[in-house]
Amino acid sequence: MSDEYTSPAVSELPPFEQGRHLLSVSQFDLPGLRQLFALADAVDVIAKRRAVCTVLDGAMLGSLFFEPSTRTRLSFESAFLRLGGEVTTTTGFTFSSMAKGESIADTARVVSGYSDALVVRHPEVGSVAQFAAASTVPVINAGDGTGEHPSQALLDVYTLEKELAVRDKKVDGCRIAVIGDLRYGRTVHSLLKLLSLYSEITFQVFAPPSLELPEGIAQYVRQRGHNVSVYDSVIAAVANADVVYATRVQRERMTHELAQANTNGDLLNRALLAEAGNLDVVIMHPLPRDSRPDSYDLSADVDELPGLAIFHQTDNGLNIRMAVFLTALGVNIDAVTLTTKQRPWKAALRS
Ligand code: ASP
């Protein structure tokens, strides 16, 4: 299988630090990841709206989403606002000058003149890197087609560590079932690369025919000492896994026939987990979950299970995206602490 669905040349990118773009998870090593996660922990009180922070007073975020988004856009924008900054937004091609044929480079040059940082989502692989090349301020990749979604992988791994820790387990040596549309689902591409920083993970992979994991990703992971085992059923992939990471069929990225070919029943539900003998498994999903009938996604009938972590992921996204902005803008935690105060009305609440 070819690698047309993943971002090219990401290994040449510099580490993610002050003044740098965030385009790929390949910009992290383990110490860099630890530093980002420590920052994400430190801003928790602000993320949970128990305190107000003004450290980014006067800073402006340009938020440009040329593909649909709910949680990624809102959590990036909320993260910047929580830190005291301001946000300007454009969504879709219709309401931007790209509808008049403006190039990515011109758009990037113009909006970076109005902003201190940019968050960009665009349907083409490599497009956000083109955006970054013409921008005068740090650009954060919020998803480039089927390429990467680095902030999603960061919040996924941050969540994974926490979920496993409460079960006295570690990411090193764990078994992760990765199921669903692994070809067009960019979150899995970023996630597997980022998890490659850890040791001896077993990825138990299941994808419907024609939606398999790109070979380049499997190779990347194997070259770093991990095991990738391919299964022909969800039940086999999930049995004995510590975690299951399920993904939606990315219908918007495929032909109607291909989308139809993969629509029957649920990808994962309570009955399948019971049959796999693994009702306690940690359940993750990048969301959105496709709730239409026969959408072949994660069923809502797992929502009462003890391992459901999907809404912990979305909550943690705010902390991670705050940490991403603080890193890109070079703001240290002392400055955050100095500009943070309690919210009197919250303190006054009974519980
Ligand atoms: N929200 C994720 C993304 O933008 C996952 C998905 O859409 O299925 O890639």
Image: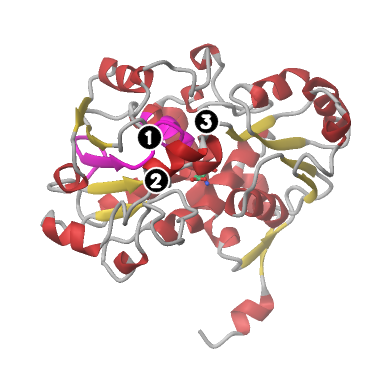
Query: Split into 4 quadrants, where in the image is the N terminus?
Result: top left
Judge the density around disc 2: few (<14), some (14-19), many (≥20) Cα neighbours within 10 Å: many
| Magenta run includes residue 190 | yes
Q: Position of residue 123 (x, y in %)?
A: 63, 33
Residue drawn where x is 67% and y is 46% of the image: 335
Q: Nearer the viewer, residue 132 or 319?
A: 132
* Element carrying mark 3: loop
Residue under circle 3?
A: 146
Q: Nearer the viewer, residue 194 or 220?
A: 220
Contact, CB < 8 Å: mark 2 with mark 1? yes
Q: Position of residue 41 (x, y in %)?
A: 48, 51
In the picture, the disc for residue 182 is 1
Q: Nearer the viewer, residue 329 or 93?
A: 93
Contact, CB < 8 Å: mark 1 with mark 3? no
In the picture, the disc for residue 51 is none
Q: Amino acid at mark 1?
A: Leu
| Magenta run includes residue 325 | no
Relative height, residue 86 to residue 142 (above, below): below
Asked whether residue 113 appears in the rendered view, the answer is yes
Q: Amino acid at mark 2?
A: Thr
In the picture, the disc for residue 247 is 2
Tell me which numbered mark, 1 or 3, is placed earlier along the sequence.
Answer: 3
Q: Is residue 13 left or right of residue 222?
A: right
Q: Amino acid at mark 3?
A: Thr
Q: Position of residue 244 (x, y in %)?
A: 27, 48
User: Which stretch appears magenta?
Assistant: 170-192
